[in-house]
Amino acid sequence: MYQYKTIVSNNDVDFRFELKVTAIFRLFQDAALLATQESGTDSISLSKRNIDWVITRMDVEILRLPKCNEEITIITYPGRDLLMVYPRHFIIKDSNDKIIIRSSSIWALMDATSRKVITDRNIIDKLPPESSPDELPLPQKIEMPIDKTFIEQRKIHYSDMDFNRHMNNVRYVELLIDVHDFEFYKKYRPSFISLNYIKEIKEKETVSIYSSGINPEFIGVTNDDIPSFIGKVTFVEQ
């Protein structure tokens, strides 16, 4: 298992001086990159071979949000490969070795030119699978309810893009979080987030954002009425 310690930066906290929910996903992205560099299967190395890592599903359980300047340990490891997808798990612990956040995710490899999933199992060296009794089960498919409320439209700009030339994974989470305002988050915080990434979104495209339900709440993002992303969020009182 790959792990390292870091300090929660003041740039990554909210008005409660707690780690922003969106910052969790950036930490996971960084951890996955660092963990795969030695094997040459990190996103930067693979991009030179015209290959992209794409995330398809992710679940995140938030037991507690660490405070500004708090030391945390981030742990990540690959699960057992499943056909054409690659599971990866994440765990965040506090200085007392107590789990405060855990996550499971499913990734695929995509040809950067054709934008098609790569089915060749030998395209990268296999990562030895690991497991932990503390890991979160793998994420499942989310169905967006038929009855939903339109929230808003957003045009995707250059700053939303990553080096894969599509909207960054974390930006989807920001769209989800921004469905509610400051007054809402004074009372509630997410305790469990499930994400399904369905279709990539590119620069200059306009997406529509929908909401359904209360707790859990479903958030859907569509492009030309075609689903691009579905999130499911359970909230707890602060």
Image: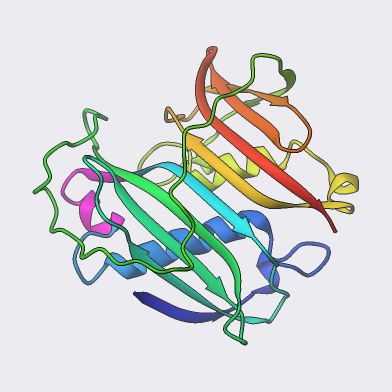
Q: Is residue 71 above or below residue 154?
A: below
Instruction: Locate residue 236, reporting x and y percent.
Output: 79, 52
Judge from the rendering whether residue 106 lies leftward or rightward of residue 170; answer left or right: left
Residue at the location (74% across, 68% down)?
18
Reply yes or no: does residue 110 show up in magenta.
no
Q: Is residue 129 above or below residue 49?
A: below
Q: Quadrant of the N terminus?
A: bottom left
Q: Is residue 210 above or below residue 44?
A: above
* Image quarter of residue 85: top left
Residue at the location (75% across, 28% down)?
213
Instruction: Locate residue 136, reporting x and y percent.
Output: 49, 57
Q: Quadrant of the C terminus?
A: bottom right
Range covered by the magenta-colored residues: 43-53
Q: Is residue 203 above or below residue 26?
A: above
Residue at the location (24% across, 37% down)?
112
Residue extending farthest front: 133
Judge from the rendering whether residue 187 lies leftward or rightward of residue 73; answer left or right: right
